[in-house]
Image: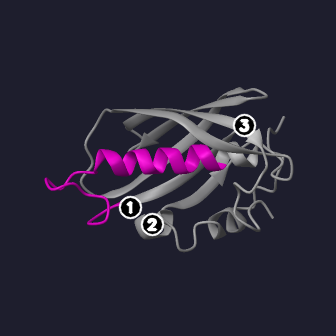
Amino acid sequence: MSIWKQSTELARINGWSTNTMMATLGITFTAVGDDWLSATMPVDHRTHQPFGLLHGGASVVLAETVGSTAAMLALDPAVEVAVGLDINANHIRGVRSGLVTGTAKVVHLGRSTQVWEIRITNEEDSLVCLSRLTMAVVPTRKVAPAGFGK
């Protein structure tokens, strides 16, 4: 059974990234299931650290992007929105090039919090980073940008 309360059309979701960090880093939403969402990010000059490896901060950006987007899709933005409370990341394996894929899978959907596990893998499907994101669910005020969720 699907957990989504909004349309999960990928073109719509990718449209939210216009003029954001996600666009700058090349993050693209690529797949969605009943309780998960995936996005890719290139490993290149935009996401490298000085030694030519994927920057841990870029991995965290991918994790927070895919997890927080999934959190919002699981809510009705006319009523409530999700805001980040905590994120952690364990960096498992270095990557020098190619694409990494972040997949957020729901762990807990509560009335006031959500918890998401985000697994980032390389093109060989080896684990690169394991992250956990906790989101607070708050009543909609003027937190969400105009048009978000439409």
Along the line of sight, the residue nearer the viewer: 27 or 113: 113
**In this rendering, which labeled residue sits more in front, label 1 or label 2?**
2
Mark 2 — residue? 26
Secondary element at image label 1: strand
- Name the image colouring: one colour
Q: Earlier in the sequence, mark 1 or mark 2?
A: 2
Find out whether residue 53 is within the magenta segment: yes
- Quadrant for residue 97, please give it: bottom left
Is residue 39 depicted above or below 103 in this figure? below
Is residue 107 depicted above or below 101 in this figure? above
Q: Residue at x 57, y 48 (%)?
A: 66
Q: Which mark is residue 137?
A: 3
Mark 1 — residue? 42
Q: Is residue 103 left or right of residue 110?
A: left
**Amino acid type indicated by mark 3:** Val
Crowd band around label 1 with a 10 angstrom C-alpha radius: few (<14), some (14–19), many (20+): some
**Amino acid type indicated by mark 1:** Pro
Q: Do labels 3 and 2 touch, CB within 8 Å?
A: no
Is residue 125 depicted above or below 12 in this figure? above
Cα separation between marks 1 and 2: 6 Å
Question: Where, quadrant-wise, is the N terminus in this rendering?
Answer: top right
Whole-percent x, y for residue 113 in the image: 69, 29
